[in-house]
Image (cartoon, helix red, strand yellow):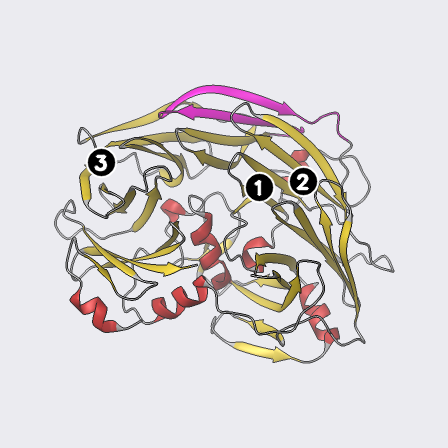
Amino acid sequence: MNKFFLGICFAFSVFQATAQNTFLKVDNDKKQGYRFVKDAFSVVDKNTQNLAVFIDDNKTMNGYLYSKELKRIGSIASDGLPNRYDEIIGHTIKGKEITLFLKSSNNKKFGSILFDFENSKTKETKFDFKLRKENFVQTYSKDERFYLITSQKRTSDIHVYTFENGKKVSKKTLSFADKNIINSGSKEATLHDLMNTSVGIGSNIKVIKIDEHTPNSIEATGDASKLYTRDGSFLLTFDKNKKITYLIEVFLPDLSASFSQVEKPQLSENDFYDKSNSFVYEDKIFQIIASNSQMKFSAKDLKSKKELKAITLNKEEDILFKNTPIIQEGGVYNKDRVREMEKTSKFLRKISADKIGLAVKPTNSGYQITMGGTKELNAGGGAMMMPGFGGAVPVASFGAMSMSFNPTFFAYNSYTSTKSTRIESLFDNNFSHVSGEIEENAFDKIKTFADEQKNKKAENVFKYKNGYLYGNYNSKENVYELTYFED
């Protein structure tokens, strides 16, 4: 990015730098003294295109609301909730009122902060309920409603708490006890079992929130349980069983639900160490399974289960459907290191060693599909357990306050704590492999720009109009800078 444009931006001003980039500087004038800015995140009203920026300065939560013309509408500071409410998990929007929902670090207690930009006031609320014999799963935000999803321990019951205008209005239980759910050992299981990553006694529910229309990496999609955010529903998928993908779609606002399952392709020989996963894109499901000697991939119509594409790859064969070399990327000490492999056998050995994953992105003529595996790394204290995720991520990569709030930012940042091995492949709409170069996506452009910024603080990436906004706090000028990138 041309640094000249950064130099000429003034507080409250918007400039068109290029056809793809717009800059906005948000003056953090609610910040008091020399408080350290801890985190920042944004909310976009899809109906009005109003943009709210929230900056946590470790003492107050400062909110700034802008119109679609990027003119400031108002600003408010909230003293926030007690420190134990340390993760923002969703929001609701009603006109110029934005409510942020938070949870405690133990996933038991919940609260909210109302920012009323119309009347310049806030309201902090600690909800009078906490989860008992339930585990926090994920959340979904839709206009004036916020949905909190939990799992009843040792059952196939899912509870959905609905909040409107910052108040809890209902709890609905969706029971799937009559469904034939099995684990990989062909034994009867519950939905709670499918989401639980703990070995032995205890529960550690890990469900990753996915925006299927964001450039996802296999680092973001490699977990066995996912929640896909859709316009009129949310979709839960479970891949703990190596033979079946289970799917639950919950439709809004009545919270009716459908349950289905899709069989995965199976390897020629049973292998105890094989790994499998899936990715859903619109009306199609993509599945992969691999061992150190063979990989199978399939694409199916989600409704009819009709197979649209099937690929079998053996370790002694060349990979004829790839558009890149076999890429190994990342590491504990050099996350930007990239190496290329030649042997298919090594590729299969790497992708089946830990978490295997798929990511799908549409192109002008078909699909770009990423296939590979990731290995979580421990840099000897350089990573920490983040609330609600049950996995290690770098301390500097995310703001704990907004970890599960924004799946776009999670997708952008996900690769920093892993070592991945992958290939990229291009297919047309009929799923025939096509030649061509892999085009740079919006996240690639953002990363190039972000790497040039010095002393990055409170970074954020989120969807805005037809592209993405990258945010970075400039402590020298006490402003939050937003840069626009076309998708």
Main SS type for the magenta part? Answer: strand
**What stretch of residues is rendered in magenta?**
152-179
Q: Are discs 1 and 2 less than 8 Å apart at CB?
A: no
Q: Nearer the viewer, residue 401 or 278?
A: 278
Q: Nearer the viewer, residue 8 or 174?
A: 8
Q: Quadrant of residue 30?
A: top left
Residue 216, can we see it?
yes
Q: Looking at the picture, which amino acid does disc 1 mark? A: Asn
Residue at numbered disc 2? 194
User: Residue at left 49%, top 43%?
Assistant: 388
Specify the label residue 151 is tagged with: none
Q: Quadrant for the N terminus, please.
A: bottom left
Mark nearer the N terminus (1 vs 2): 2
Q: Looking at the picture, which amino acid does disc 3 mark? A: Asp
Q: Is residue 38 magenta?
A: no
The residue at the far left in this view is 33
User: Residue at left 67%, top 71%?
Assistant: 322
Q: Disc 1 or disc 2, which is closer to the eye?
A: 2
